Image (cartoon, rainbow, N blue to C red):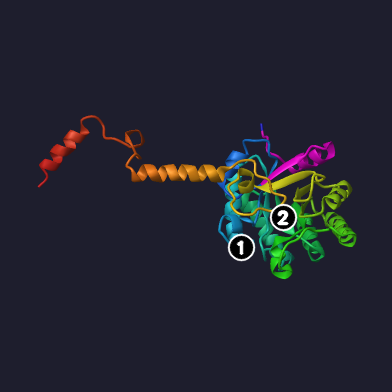
Amino acid sequence: MNNKITIANLYEAKESGSRIAAVSCYDYTTAKLISQKDVDMILVGDSAAQIMLGFDSTLPATMDFMVTITSAVRRGAPEMYLVADMPFLSYQIGVETAMKNAGRFMAEAGAQMVKIEANSAYIDIIKALSDAGIAVMAHIGIRPQSISKIGRFKAEATEAKVALELICLADRMIEAGASSLLLEGTAAEVAEIITKRSLVPVIGCGSGPGCDGQILVSSDILGISQGKLPKFTKSYGDLAAETLRAVDQYAEEVKKGIFPDREHSYHMKKGQLEELQNLLKNKP
């Protein structure tokens, strides 16, 4: 029986009031673990440029890189609903480029939806992709790919006029054919209004409890991330401390000659060592 999660399941969850649990992750191993629990959606975000590669923004993520890691996540989580993040300059250039790159995610990586950081300038692109049968998640609110223009991030829609603009933008995204919305860093009250008005699933990232679902980055959930984290992030483990402990013990055992021991080594078959020693003695 095929238990693969589809977009129909996400719409059913919205209609029934069931919350959608989504996680951002970037690799096969983590995806395989996540897929064993009650998570509905994995987003392969361009934040991989920061978390995996150490850049200070999402901008260096390339299409080839994103397709590669998205396909890895698909192999690790074949039944999960998979969303691929369209990286910087993969759709901004125009409809033809956006169509080609979105198609790569679907055909090469097994994605079921692509995510676009959108404002009113990208209405035509969302409509074109939707008309071509590609499901699109419109990412509004804080948009990390705009960092070079805005300089720093701050909470969105905390004032009435800006809130109204964001609500209208959400409406336009859905009218253009967006199959889902992602609201990042949006005032909780506004996110709840958008969610109630929306006919499509709304996933929140730092946008309060009123959305249809929530998403966090896997490394934050696991407690691997170090340094100051955003206000909306919550860790459910402390794998950074456990990782440090394990690496410290490994290094100590290597330096003391404790590891590897006999149990963790391969050995010759019985009698073969003696035969080898005789062969070496007779070697000219």
User: From what the image shows, is residue 83 above or below residue 120?
Assistant: above
Q: CA distance from mark 2 to mark 1?
A: 21 Å
Residue 201, position as x, y percentages in the image = 80, 46
**Residue closest to the eye, 222 or 52:** 222
Residue at 82%, 47% in the rendered image? 200
User: Within 10 Å of the Cα at label 1, are there few (<14), some (14-19), or many (20+) other Cα atoms?
Assistant: few
Question: Is residue 133 in sight in this rendering?
Answer: no
Residue at 68%, 57% in the rendered image? 102
The answer to whether 18 appears left or right of 106 in the picture is right
Amino acid at dot 1 = Asp
User: From what the image shows, is residue 135 above or below residue 14?
Assistant: below
Q: Which residue is labeled 1 in the image?
A: 56
Q: Quadrant of the N terminus?
A: top right
Amino acid at dot 2 = Lys
Picture quadrant where residue 77 is located: top right
Select label 2 or label 1 by which is in front.
1
Residue 115, labelled with which disc?
Answer: 2
Q: Earlier in the sequence, mark 2 or mark 1?
A: 1
**Residue closest to the eye, 284 or 24:** 24
State the extent of the magenta-drawn residues as a range: 2-23
Residue at 79%, 63% in the rendered image? 119
What SS does tag 2 mark? Answer: strand
Magenta stretch: includes residue 173: no
The answer to whether 5 appears left or right of 242 in the picture is right
Residue 123, position as x, y percentages in the image = 81, 62
**Residue closest to the eye, 218 or 176:** 218
User: From what the image shows, is residue 79 above or below residue 52?
Assistant: above
Q: Are marks 2 and 1 in contact (CB under 8 Å)?
A: no
